[in-house]
Image: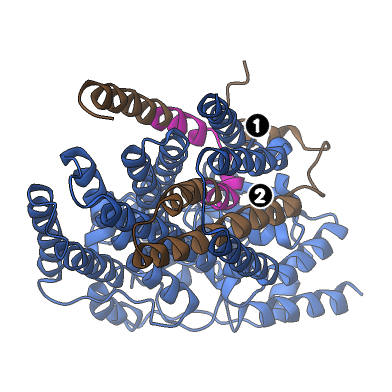
Chain colours: A blue, B brown
Amino acid sequence: MNDLLVAYLYVIAIVLFVLSLRWMSEVKTSQRGNWAGVVGMIFAVGGTLLAYQIQRIDLLVGAVIVGTIVGMLIALKLPMTAVPQRTAMSHAFGSLAVALVGASEYYNRAIGIDTFSISVLSAEMILGFLTFTGSCIAFAKLQGLIPGKPLIYPGRIYVSLSSLGIAIALAVYFILNPADSFILPVMAAFALLFGFLLVMAIGGADMPTVISILNAYAGISAAGLGFVLDNKVLIVAGSLDGSSGFILAMIMSQAMNRSFLNVLFGGVGAKILTESSSAAQQGRSVQSYTPEDVATVLENARSVVFVPGYGMAVSQAQHVVKELADLLESKSIDVKYAIHPVAGRMPGHMNVLLAEAQVPYEQLWEMDRINPLFPETDVAIVVGANDVTNPAARTKADSPLYGMPILDVDKARTVVFIKRSMNPGFSGMDNELFYLPHTMMVFGDAKKVMADLVAAIKSKFG
Amino acid sequence: MSGDAAQADLAVNLLIFLISTFLGIELIRHVSRLLHTPLMALTNAISSVSIVAALIVLAEPKNDFILILVTIALALSATNIVSGFMITGRILRMFAPNGGRKKSAKGEEQNGKGSAKA
């Protein structure tokens, strides 16, 4: 009777999780989607508490209280610019939790564990542990605790792959000799090492793809645990999460015209940096302007497109951007925002920052829709984006960016490019855009430049 | 469970896994790009239903070491659940006030991309 009740509670939870994602597809219904997820979680946990008699209520309550407090602090204190870090951290937490439960399940059943369970547990633990260190490194890079540059050294692919290879070899031995429990920590150590090496070799601009892949891994390992425990909610939730991460990773890598493998092992960045810096010194010069100059141009503009990038997040410029946009709109200038799929450090990063600044989302235009409009745009203002605007992606076959779909910013009548310095973008590529005759370079921190621009326009327009 | 029963369970579970993976792919493909960040926060919270697994193991731990591992896992999952849903809600509220009903036809088109309502 009790079992049946629990089974039905699980069914309700599963339906709610599916609906949750369904409702998440549109802004209109998205809040309902979030609530469906919450209620689904209550049913899943409630059902489990009914089905299993937990003796150590003290530990349960203690852990949940700690988790709730920490979770609430994170959720309430988190600045929107730090959402990518938080996401990496949550992947780390989730995968570690799954790996630890996997390990406990093994220790609980060590003697006489069946081959199927030990196989899935091993796979799930390797995935969980590598996702844990991978996500920790992603967090450290996003938070700026360690440099975002990829760590590149000769033969690094072999070093990484051999650590994974050893972990897998140990897993195979473990499956054949499940009583040798000492294998488990060694296997875990190599999985941890692989996750560390993997993400150390990946640069900041590839984070949208990497975070998505880690998301997929965390989901799949949760589903694996569901198999071992014969728990259907866990299988469904894990595979929904896994497929979500997978799809997002696909979208991200397509937006960079690169394969998963290239993102994981390509190490774009450091290598090219050395040769390309010379291009900047080939005697071509950029024209540097002041915010006042830009204000004069904006005075006569009818349409303006903002092109935000990671730099906007770094300098927290989204609110000033909105202020400028409001000012322009009050002068009946048409304002749009061009959003490149990989702008920022995670999928949808720019959308969230602009939403925080209360930019109405009908002004956010995706790449495919905005690109035909650039030739009719008077001024395109690039705020903290770089590679996603580089025309070399269209023209230069030898460029590492070649083939990547970009925002056709260069086709606008005037391009205003706000940049901290002449350093090339993440790819190490010099941006052709800087040298175009209709490009106005404005050097300085994005937030400060935008604020100066607002002031300049206010004084000009009177 | 052993023998045939376990085999049958595995087949059912595999079926569930495959169907929900396909379902997940279809669902996620139709999510507006606008919402990819909150989507990630949401799926993360949902997959932290792995707290259920921690509870199951906590019900019959064989020794204290296991107890420690599971308690850590519990706290981590609880953190993810609480922060995941709360952050999703926080982000979605930022999208809501400006948007709501008076969405332009273009915005509709962007969001509804491929989302077959019928």
Q: Residue B100, position in %: x, y?
A: 80, 40
Q: Which label was assigned to residue B109?
A: 1
Q: Residue A263, position in %: x, y?
A: 29, 57
Quadrant in the picture for the C terminus of chain A: bottom right
Q: Residue A29, position in %: x, y?
A: 71, 35
Which one is nearer the viewer's eye here, A320 or A136? A136
Badge 2 sits on which subunit?
A: A
Q: Secondary structure at mark 2?
A: strand
Quadrant in the picture for the N terminus of chain A: top right
- Say whether residue A434 is magenta: no
Which residue corresponds to mark 2?
A364
Q: Residues within 10 Å of mark 2 (few under 14, many from 20)?
A: many
Which one is nearer the viewer's eye here, A455 or A366? A366
Q: Residue at x 65, y 44 (%)?
A: A38
Q: Main secondary structure of the magenta part?
A: helix
Q: Residue at x 20, y 46 (%)?
A: A118
- Say whether residue B34 is magenta: yes
Badge 1 sits on which subunit?
A: B
User: Three-letter amino acid code at disc 2?
Assistant: Leu
Q: Residue furthest top?
A: B118
In the rendered image, the vertical position of residue A110 relative to residue A416, given as above or below: above
Gap in angstroms between the C-alphas marked 1 and 2 = 12 Å
User: Three-letter amino acid code at disc 1?
Assistant: Glu
Q: Is residue B47 visible?
A: yes
Q: Residue A406, position in %: x, y?
A: 44, 53
Q: Is residue B31 left or right of residue A235?
A: right
Q: Residue at x 34, y 63 (%)?
A: B63
For the residues beneath circles 1 and 2, the answer to whether they share a chain is no
Magenta-drawn segment = B21-44
Q: Residues within 10 Å of mark 1 (few under 14, many from 20)?
A: few
Q: Residue at x 17, y 68 (%)?
A: A186
